[in-house]
Amino acid sequence: MANTIRVDIVSAEQDVWSGEGTMVFAPAEMGEIGIAPQHAPLLTRLKPGEIRVQQESGEEQFFFISGGMLEVQGHVVTVLSDTALRADDLDEAAALEAQRRAEQALADRGGELELAKAKAELIQAAAQLRAIQKLRGRA
Amino acid sequence: MAGGKEIRTKIKSIQNTQKITKAMEMVAASKMRRAQERMHQARPYAQKIRNVIAHVSQANLEYKHSFTLERPAKRVGFIIVSSDRGLCGGLNINLFRDVVNALTEWQSQSAEIDVTTIGSKGFQFFNRVGANIVSEATRLGDTPHLDDLIGPVKVMLDAYTDNRIDRLYLVHNHFKSTMSQTPQLEQLLPIHAVEPDETLSHHWDYLYEPDAKDVVDGLMTRYIESLVYQGVVENIACEMAARMVAMKSASDNAGDLIDELQLVYNKARQASITQEISEIVGGAAAV
């Protein structure tokens, strides 16, 4: 009991995975972090990347997430995974889009919005690729 | 046999309508089951994020988020979830009636109102009544995604952060059962105090990365978004249930109509046969 930690990975649209692990690695915004049992309470944002959960049986679980939040509380790690690509300027773009639709104005505002989206997509694609390569390496 | 043919074509056309309503009923029934599944799948996330927020509110936080602060209400925001399509009984109208009641109540307290509509029925209605619509999302389809809601919700959240609105409400249909859906109005902002977790009584605080403000901001935004997403998914389950019931009663009504018309048709046919016989008999007697 003492040397495992409960891991719950959920997204807004579905329950992804939950189980016990001996060690959890997650792509926090300030760099990758490893969480062992008895970790101090922690709240952090996650970058797009992969989450690895090492299990007692020696198996390792991989999950790709496109960002989110992570909470460590006692013996529970909660990963609130985003279903969408998130970036401040992207959210801003979505908000503008919603307003624009409401105003029924159909003016084309491409430019910087497109760029922000492309950038976020690129980050996600790169992270996805890394996760796939790792999985291939193991197989 | 004057009315005979007309009645037959009428029966035919009602039968065609009945086929359509029956098909719609079955489609709605299967879509409802899937919508209910999505409703259940969305629950763990909302539950988990609520727990985290309960923890945060208990922690010795050096930073108080504006979403938790109570302000006098001078301007009120509403996020109204409705369906994109009609033919679902009184579902939308019942919801709008409740919303309009709430709106007039706020207006009587001389508060101004901003509206975000999700679903085209709501947009059409509140556009017609002249509400101030600040953002909208339509055509989300049967499988809505959180991505589609980020924009419209952010408009309201930004307005709250900038003190342009002082309250934010979410209105959607609550799925009680297949037969019963009720409009539900819940307050999103300011966030009500979440019941504290008894197991964490001592004084402590999280480690925050990168810092408390960024992390709590992200958390609050996601919390509100997940509530709105749940409302939308639940509303779709309601829409499908209401459509199923409406289409079932439409099919039943069509069946009743067909029975009645069939009776009229049979009588007309019998009358014309009787008339022909009496004419023949009359003719034979004359010879």
Image (cartoon, coloured by chain):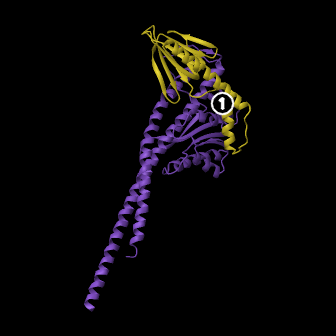
Chain colours: A yellow, B purple
Looking at the rendered structure, the number of numbered marks drawn on it comes to: 1
Q: Is residue B274 toward the left or the right of residue B190 in the image?
A: left
Residue kind at label 1, given as amino acid type: Asp
Name which residue lies at 43% across and 52% down: B247
Name which residue lies at 42% across and 65% down: B10
Q: Position of residue B52 (x, y in %)?
A: 54, 22
Question: In which image quadrant can residue B266 be found?
Answer: bottom left
Q: Position of residue B104 (x, y in %)?
A: 62, 48
Residue sitting farthest toward the top: A3
User: Depth check: A18 or B171 in front?
Assistant: A18
Mark 1 nearby-residue class (10 Å; few <14, some 14–19, many ≥20)? many
Observer able to see residue B201: no
User: Depth check: A8 or B66 in front?
Assistant: A8
Name which residue lies at 41% across and 56% down: B18
Residue receiving disc 1 = A91
Question: Image height check: is B41 above or below B281?
Answer: above
Q: Is residue A67 toward the left or the right of residue B242 in the image?
A: right
- Of the 4 image quadrants, the one containing the C terminus of chain B is bottom left
Query: Could you tell me which secondary element the residue under label 1 belongs to?
Result: helix
Which chain does the numbered disc 1 sit on?
A
User: Depth check: A29 or B274 in front?
Assistant: B274
User: Depth check: B60 or A89 in front?
Assistant: A89
Q: Position of residue B99 (x, y in %)?
A: 57, 46
Name which residue lies at 51% across and 27% down: B45
Q: Is residue B268 toward the left or the right of residue B13 in the image?
A: left
Question: In which image quadrant can residue A45 be found?
Answer: top right
Question: Image height check: is B246 above or below A28?
Answer: below
Observer able to see residue B192: yes
